[in-house]
Image (cartoon, grey):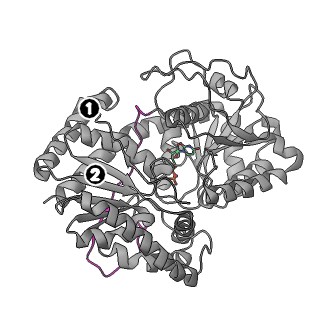
Amino acid sequence: ARTPAAPEVELPATPLEWIEPFVGSERTETVRDTLHGVRDLLDGRTVWHISDNPVRGGVAELLRADLPYLAGEGISTRWTTLDAPPEFRAFTKSLYYRLCGVAPGADTADLERGRRMYERICAENAARLVPAMDRRSIVVVHDHQTAGLIPHLRAAGCTVLWRAHIGTPLQEDLAARGWDFLHRYISCAHCHITSCAGVLPAGPEPVDRRVLQPSIDPLSPKNIPLHPGTDPSRLLAAAGLIEGERGAPPGRYALTDLLVRRPAHVVRDGGPAPAGAPLVTQVSRWDRVKDIPGVIRGFAEYVDPALDAHLLLVGPETRGDRQAERVFAECRQVWAGLGRRGRRVHLVQVPTANPSEHALTVNAIQRRSAVVIQKSLAEGFGLTVSEAAWKGRPVVAAPVGGIREQVEHGTTGLLLSDPRDLRGLGEAVNRLLSDRGYAEELGRNGHRRVLRRFLTDSSVLGFARVLLDAAQ
Ligand code: UDP
């Protein structure tokens, strides 16, 4: 069965003034002026975005955050997602692992065997979408799943920008086959945009290349401040993640003034953490690139039990997502093998049926964490790293892709010497848990760095500048 026909994502128009209290009038004016320049140049042309899905992962988070501000300044903006069967998702997942250079994934023969199916699904989606576009449209095609649409969009006369959110690969030789597979599609685009340098292999095509760093929205349910006086522990207790009064009203959130009456019922292994325990958290999709088993092992083997910390591995509900179910089962197996040490480790699936409630639950978990980990093996840009830093949390992260730009080692967080360094992970966590003053200082500096460089206005401005060129 196919996933339900992928609908267009409804985009509200958000006035730019809303972020002015965070970023100030000068920055807001710069973005507004640039967007108005783009609007005039576009002269009614629509900017389309096509991505894999409307809810899961950083691309959905970023588009949901940025696009309403473009719409809010009068730029005709539409976002649609793929209609694809499970075998397409399985194929693009193994292609993704290949591009990240983290696992053999599919061998080349498998990639070639999958090509016909990949091209068929992309052609079907193009046939559905192209009639709704006009040939003056600018289309931003996100990541490898949608790259196969590029030749169709070009043939229809659109200007096509391919935006890759993938990171620099862990092992280049593994990634090379994945790039060989994609080459014939992405070489048709007018421009390639990546989140950090060094992602794309050197190629002979004269395709324009840009680097655009993603950002986070301080006003999204993921990042808004809690209502003054609301303790995130209450929400975690109400959701059954830490000991406390289960089912008690968790409190209010500022700005949306949303009262979460029925906290997300989480699926978790490992029971609730003790009420006062320091929490060490990684929030990520259930994906091998996030190396969740490595986080579990590093924590169990190297974090000092005397510090009484508990590890929370937080991800979305896996139901209906076979690849995620498989990775979750792998993580659960590693957890089960820990024996008694597993009592300090908790696997958490947060329901996704209500996106705002999901985001608010993750927001509270991040705020309640003493340390936030992001031990990815490859990453274009880790939104979770910026989300944690924005909330003043110290971060321990792998030195990969865009994360190297996001975290200033020793100033805003701690970078491992190698993404596979489990001992280093444990030592960094021990250091932050035992020196609270240092941890707080890193958190404060991290917040300032996000404010300076990684809030919505920065990525909207960067994208507006790309559009200025594309619309010429
Ligand atoms: N996320 C979430 N719920 C989860 C796991 C992740 O809302 O259970 C969000 C996370 O907060 C972040 C995004 O998904 O906003 C992940 O983006 P990131 O750049 O860290 O990684 P990606 O998923 O794009 O590889």
Q: Secondary structure at mark 2?
A: helix
Residue 130: which disc? none
Q: Nearer the viewer, residue 202 or 47?
A: 47
Most foreground residue, 185 or 319: 319
Q: In the rendered image of this protein, does residue 46 appear above or below residue 234?
A: below
Q: Residue at x 55, y 70 (%)?
A: 91
The 10 Å Cα crowd at callout 1, few under 14, some 14 to 19, many 20 or more, is some
Residue 325, picture quadrant:
bottom right
- Choose between 174 and 6: the one closer to the eye: 6
Give the magenta-colored segment's residue range: 198-220
Left or right: 136 with respect to 430? Answer: left
Q: Secondary structure at mark 1?
A: loop
Tag 2 residue:
463
Choose the circle earlier in sequence order: 1 or 2.
Answer: 1
Q: What residue is at 67 percent from the left and 18 percent from the top?
A: 248
Where residue 282 appears, x then y in whole percent? Answer: 63, 45
Farthest top residue in view: 229
Identity, as a three-letter code, of the amino acid under mark 1: Pro
Of 328 and 462, the residue lying toward us: 328
Q: Position of residue 461 (x, y in %)?
A: 26, 46
Q: Position of residue 176 (x, y in %)?
A: 49, 78
Q: Residue at x 76, y 32 (%)?
A: 273
Percent from the top left, x then y, of residue 208? 26, 69
On the image, numbered disc 1 is attached to which residue? 15
